[in-house]
Every structure is written in structure tokens, then in C-alpha cells.
């Protein structure tokens, strides 16, 4: 009886621990990539088409590279993910957002930028990828000290 | 600076709900040096989850490029007063925090 109970508990623990570990997935390879191209490769994105339905709202000039606000809205039907790349940062991939049923493909965040560069945003929709870019001029870089 | 409390604000729009959340976190890049010239080790939030009434609607993976004390705005489809919204994070040291609130 005790043994049975213990194995049931062990099984339950496994069943609970697994999804939690899966939830905390973090793509180390993509986030460690040093070029936007390598980051995209690690994310499994081979090619992306430019899209006017992907909107980036960000300042043209950011005086402080430590806090650069970026707002992203996708009007591409069926958008399930948004990916943010800061092209000249030491590690370009900044974020990946997965939107499930109940969320709209919109996000606003603040990022650090090392220097003047393009911010490249990708959207995933129906297994295809789309991108939009905007240059942000940075007066004081925000990655070091 | 250590990781600390969170703040959240929700507002109901027409057909959507806005969620704005603030996290207290140093978001160290591992490149910055302290006053003694020693490199401050990497310490940053890696995972972010938004749940509505217990169901995950947004899952995010982020890097050290997100600014210190991160602020995020998200937009949820529909929504009604009383909807329970929970935002949680997990960092590279295994520290975590969460905040829960109801749409007013």
C-alpha cells in the first residue's frame, strides 16, 4: 500500500514537474547568438518577407540607450509570435513573445541598445515569417557601464 | 540591487484589455563593471508568463537586453471586469515572482 502510494506520488510529481520545466524553456542557443542571422537560424527561421502590417513604434533618436521604448503591433492575421532583434547588440536577440488564444499580438517594452542600429521585428503567422525594421539612433549606449 | 516587488495595472477598452506590468529587477548584462572595476555577473529575467483566469495567454523568453526594472504592456482580447490576471517571471538564478489582480 505504502509502496503503491509512493509510486503514485512519484508519478504525479513527474507529471507536474515536466510541464513546469517545459514552461520555463529558454532558447539558450538563439539568445547566445552573436549575429542576427545566427539568432534567426537558431530560432528555425529561414526566410522572412517584409510586411507593412507589422508596425514598430520607437523613437528615431534615443538619447539614453539604457531605456529605449519599442511598441510592436501586428495586423497580420493569425500572428502567434513576435520576435525582437537589436541588430548591433552583442547578443542581438532581445525577446520572443508567444501569443495564444486570448492575447492580441501587441507588446510594448523597454530595451537597452549598445549603439545606433536597426531594430528588426519578426512576426510568425501560419508557419510563415514577416519582418519590419526601424533605425534608432542612440546617443549614449546602454549595455556596458 | 536585488529583484523585488511587481506592480500591475489593467484597463478595460472596447473589445480588449490592456495590462501594464512593472518588475523590479537589475537585468544585469554581465558587461557592466561596479565601482571597484569588477564585472557584475549576468542576472536577468528569462521567462515571462501572462495568465487570464488560470489560462496561459502569453509566454515570453527575454534577454539581458531588456531594460532594468522591466515594464511591459500587453493587450488581451475581450475581457470583463473581474477577470483574474496573473503575470509571473523567472530569472537565470532561479528566482521568481508573480502578481495577480482582477480587471476593474
Image (tube, coloured by chain):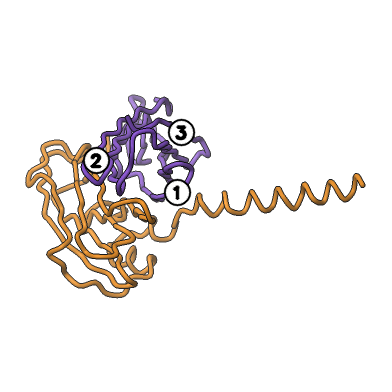
Chain colours: A orange, B purple
Residue B92 is situated, as x and y percent measured from the top left of the image, at 47, 42
Label 2 to label 3, Cα distance in Å?
20 Å
Q: Quadrant of residue B26?
A: top left
Label 1 SS: strand
In the foreground, A60 or A1: A1
Residue at 90%, 48% (x, y): give it: A3
Indicate the quadrant containing the C terminus of chain A: top left, top right, bottom left or bottom right: top left
- The residue sitting at 19% across, 47% down in the picture is A71
B62 shown above or below B69: below
Say if labels 1 and 3 share a chain. yes
Residue A86 x, y percent position in the rendering:
23, 53
- Establish if A124 lies above or below B95: below
Report helix, strand or loop for mark 2.
Answer: strand
The residue indicated by pointer 3 is B98
Residue named by callout 2: A110
Q: CA distance from mark 1 to mark 3?
A: 14 Å
**Between tags 2 and 3, which lies in front?**
3
In this rendering, would B98 be left or right of B19?
right
The residue nearer to you, when weighing B67 against B35, is: B67
Q: Nearer the viewer, mark 1 or mark 2?
A: 1
**Label 2 and label 3 in one chain:** no
Compared with residue B85, is residue A52 higher up or lower down, i.e. above or below? below
Q: Residue B97 location in percent, x, y?
A: 47, 33
- Asked which quadrant contains residue B53, the reply is top left
Amino acid at each position: 500500500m505504502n509502496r503503491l502510494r509512493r509510486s503514485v506520488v512519484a508519478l504525479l510529481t513527474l507529471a507536474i514537474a515536466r510541464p513546469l520545466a517545459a514552461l520555463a524553456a529558454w532558447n539558450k542557443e538563439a539568445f547566445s547568438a552573436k549575429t542576427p542571422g545566427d539568432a534567426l537560424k537558431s530560432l528555425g527561421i529561414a526566410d522572412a518577407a517584409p510586411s507593412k502590417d507589422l508596425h514598430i513604434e520607437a523613437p528615431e533618436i534615443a538619447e539614453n540607450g539604457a531605456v529605449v521604448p519599442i511598441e510592436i503591433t501586428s495586423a497580420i492575421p493569425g500572428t502567434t509570435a513576435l520576435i525582437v532583434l537589436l541588430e548591433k547588440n552583442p547578443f542581438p536577440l532581445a525577446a520572443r513573445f508567444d501569443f495564444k488564444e486570448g492575447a492580441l499580438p501587441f507588446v510594448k517594452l523597454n530595451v537597452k541598445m549598445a549603439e545606433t542600429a536597426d531594430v528588426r521585428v519578426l512576426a510568425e503567422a501560419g508557419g510563415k515569417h514577416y519582418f519590419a525594421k526601424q533605425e534608432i539612433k542612440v546617443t549614449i549606449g546602454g549595455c556596458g557601464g | 540591487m536585488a529583484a523585488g516587488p511587481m506592480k500591475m495595472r489593467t484597463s478595460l477598452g472596447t473589445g480588449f484589455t490592456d495590462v501594464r506590468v512593472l518588475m523590479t529587477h537589475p537585468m544585469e548584462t554581465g558587461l557592466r563593471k561596479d565601482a571597484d572595476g569588477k564585472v557584475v555577473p549576468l542576472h536577468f529575467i528569462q521567462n515571462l508568463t501572462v495568465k487570464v483566469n488560470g489560462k496561459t495567454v502569453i509566454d515570453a523568453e527575454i534577454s539581458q537586453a531588456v531594460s532594468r526594472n522591466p515594464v511591459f504592456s500587453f493587450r488581451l482580447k475581450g475581457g470583463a471586469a473581474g477577470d483574474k490576471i496573473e503575470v509571473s517571471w523567472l530569472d537565470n538564478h532561479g528566482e521568481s515572482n508573480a502578481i495577480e489582480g482582477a480587471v476593474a
